[in-house]
Amino acid sequence: MKEILYSSTRGDKGRIRASEAILRGLAPDGGLYVPDSIPVLEKTLREISSLTYQETAYEVMKLLLTDYTEDELKYCISHAYDSKFDTEEIAPLSEAGGAYYLELYHGATIAFKDMALSILPYLMTTAAKKNNVKNEIVILTATSGDTGKAALAGFADVPGTRIIVFYPKHGVSPIQEQQMVTQKGDNTCVIGIEGNFDDAQTGVKKIFTDPELKELLDSKGFQFSSANSINIGRLVPQIVYYVYSYAKLLKEGRIADGDSINVVVPTGNFGNILAAYYAKNMGVPIAKLICASNSNKVLFDFFQSGEYDRNRDFVLTSSPSMDILISSNLERLIYHIAGNSAEADAAYMEKLTKEGRYEITDEMRAKLTDFFGGFATEEETFATISDLFKETGYLIDTHTAVAASVYGKYVKETGDKTVTVIASTASPYKFTRSVMNALGHGDDNSDDFALADKLSEISGVAIPEAVESIRNAEIRHKTVVDKTEMEKAVKEFLKV
Ligand SMILES: *Cc1c(COP(=O)(O)O)cnc(C)c1O
């Protein structure tokens, strides 16, 4: 098997092994780690179709995380994808309204972030052992709601780690906030900030790349890493379910060998859809990668015009995990379509930091023809939830509804009848109020838990344990700071 090494999108010359890239999270120059080549699947998709989710995960991850031994990887996989998921399939496919919904929300925190964050702590602690790291690893995470809880759940009480999560105090759903502030584990710290997600993400990146702070922490026995999708250890496990879903369609006879499928991904930070792009490059016959945005449609505009422009108002929507104007993982795609050029990428990213915008070349745009960008307004999102439920009885959350709505528009526009997989990224119970709103119960003033009871009555879908368990849980995290005070808050928690 070919060894895969990782380098920074911004030109760090040194190439490092997967375990080191996972430990570091972000490259010292602020870039993201990318593989030096993209390996092709060894088994055929037909062969993969008889494998379990865990076996598929091994087939995919061994090709990219080449410095992990077979035993190490299998240990990580079996501890991640176990009874924390409420279905043995881990990522079931449900057909509704002419598409296949790939349900990625059956893990501990009922959103797709569990797919990667249930394994990242194992990959990271294994990496620490492999690299003789003596420091305690401090996971620093900015969240638009879902990453934070999934990372907390993954890292809580993991020996040798601490985790600090920043979330926009006024930018997450009540259930999301309750999930985070009730988190148990002495190594956990949750902080609300007065600011939006981009502020949180920018603040975290700044703390990460501060050399003085790094030195101070090192002298006290700490080092930072990231659980955000900038960490390659999150991206790799996300490739698995695209391979798995294709193999599943094959196994069930929904497609024939070699048939193409389309995938639709409700997108924020561009991590999930980038994983689909890698899956395609590894040999999964994916025709179109349909990138669905909400009203923060910076990516839609980018695919239309080739210009990325974050100079616009940040809109709070009913799909908060996609309320993002700086899609971090797009940087990896920019690097690839620039011909794996760190020089070009670094120049674009500098422009983004300084001017808030950049425009790619026509040559680069020509490499984006597999992507289709679309967006859905709030009205369209709500109508999609309601229509799908009325017509089929299948209930989706607001994020998934953005994708379903964009898919509907795509089919209308193109007439493309290719079998399509829609990434279903959250349980409707994570965004109960918005879903109830969509179903015509927007005037109900009950709290979110009472509302969940009503949604369960209407839909016949049981309330997930992840919601039940936080209903009356003790609130353990109450700190709120200004966006300029994030570093101070980190130092306080670590007592440095
Ligand atoms: C994080 C998230 C997204 C966006 O995924 P990206 O990888 O950031 O593009 C979409 N939906 C839900 C529910 C999420 O939690």
Image: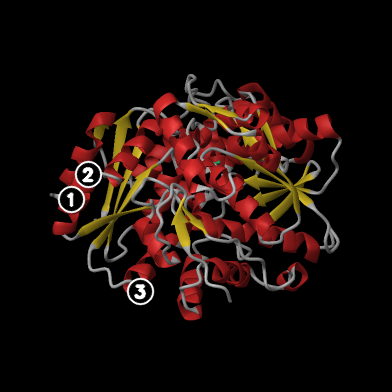
Choose mark 1 or mark 3, whichever is in front: 3
Name the residue located 38 percent from the left edge and 40 percent from the top edge: 178
- The residue beneath circle 1 is 494
Crowdedness near tag 3: few (<14), some (14–19) or many (≥20) residues, C-alpha within 10 Å: some
Image check: 216 left or right of 24?
A: left
- The residue beneath circle 2 is 490
**Image x and y of residue 214, in percent:** 22, 51
Secondary element at image label 2: helix
**Foreground residue among 155 and 458:** 155
Amino acid bearing label 1: Leu
Image check: 246 left or right of 310?
A: right
Mark 1 or 3 closer to N-term?
3
Q: Confirm or deny contact between disc 2 and disc 1 (CB under 8 A).
A: yes
Q: Of the numbered discs in the image, which one, if any, rests on residue 151?
A: none
- The residue beneath circle 3 is 130
* Figure check: 263 above or below 219: above
Estimate the spatial distance between the alpha carbons at disc 1 and disc 3, rounded to whole Å.
25 Å
